[in-house]
Image: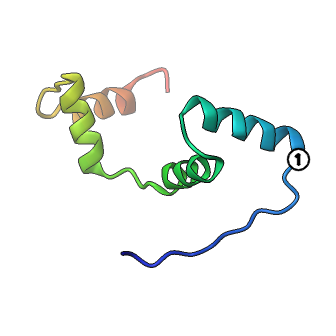
Amino acid sequence: MPATVTLSVKNVPTAVAKRLKERAARNNRSLQGELQSILEQAAHVTTLGDLAALAKRLGLKGEAGESARMIREDRDDPRR
């Protein structure tokens, strides 16, 4: 089992705590589980591999050299 750390958040406004509890209930989680999910999402680092996988899932395709062409067009635009 990986090492864990206990965190504590103090002085959370009542309205925020209420909304978090409601969110937890909507997601069928305990408040603790919802807070862990929020922290995991916040700590996630998106990699180029993640972006490539997303593009593939979405069916996005680009021509080879397309980005270089777009940069050149933008750079050489006479309105700039």
Establish if 36 lies above or below 10: above
Amino acid carrying label 1: it is: Pro
Q: Quadrant of residue 71?
A: top left
* Residue drawn at 60 percent across, 46 percent down: 30
Front one among 40 and 14 = 14
> Measured from the top left, where is residue 77 in percent x and y?
40, 24
| 54 horizontally vs 43: left or right | left
Q: Is residue 77 left or right of residue 68?
A: right
Instruction: Check the image and report above or below for 30 versus 7.
Output: above
Residue 31 x %, y %: 65, 47
- Front-lying residue, 53 or 35: 35
Q: Pick whichever, 73 or 42, lies toward us.
A: 42
In the picture as drawn, the residue positioned furthest to the left comes out as 64
**Relative vertical location of residue 32 with respect to residue 54 in this rendering, above or below:** below
Q: Quadrant of the N terminus?
A: bottom left
Name the spot of residue 19 as percent of width and height, x first. Answer: 75, 35
Q: Count all numbered tags in the image, as a single digit.
A: 1
Residue holding disc 1: 13
How is this picture coloured? rainbow
Left or right: residue 52 compared with residue 1: left
The residue depicted at 79 percent of the width and 44 percent of the height is 17
Q: Residues within 10 Å of mark 1 (few under 14, many from 20)?
A: few
35 to the left or right of 53: right
Tell me the residue at 83%/63% (across/down). 10
In this rendered view, identify the residue nearer to me: 26 or 54.
26
In the rendered image, residue 27, in percent from the top left (x then y), is placed at 54, 33
Indicate the secondary structure of the residue bearing disc 1.
loop
Which residue lies at the image location 21% right of the left edge and 24% below the top edge?
60
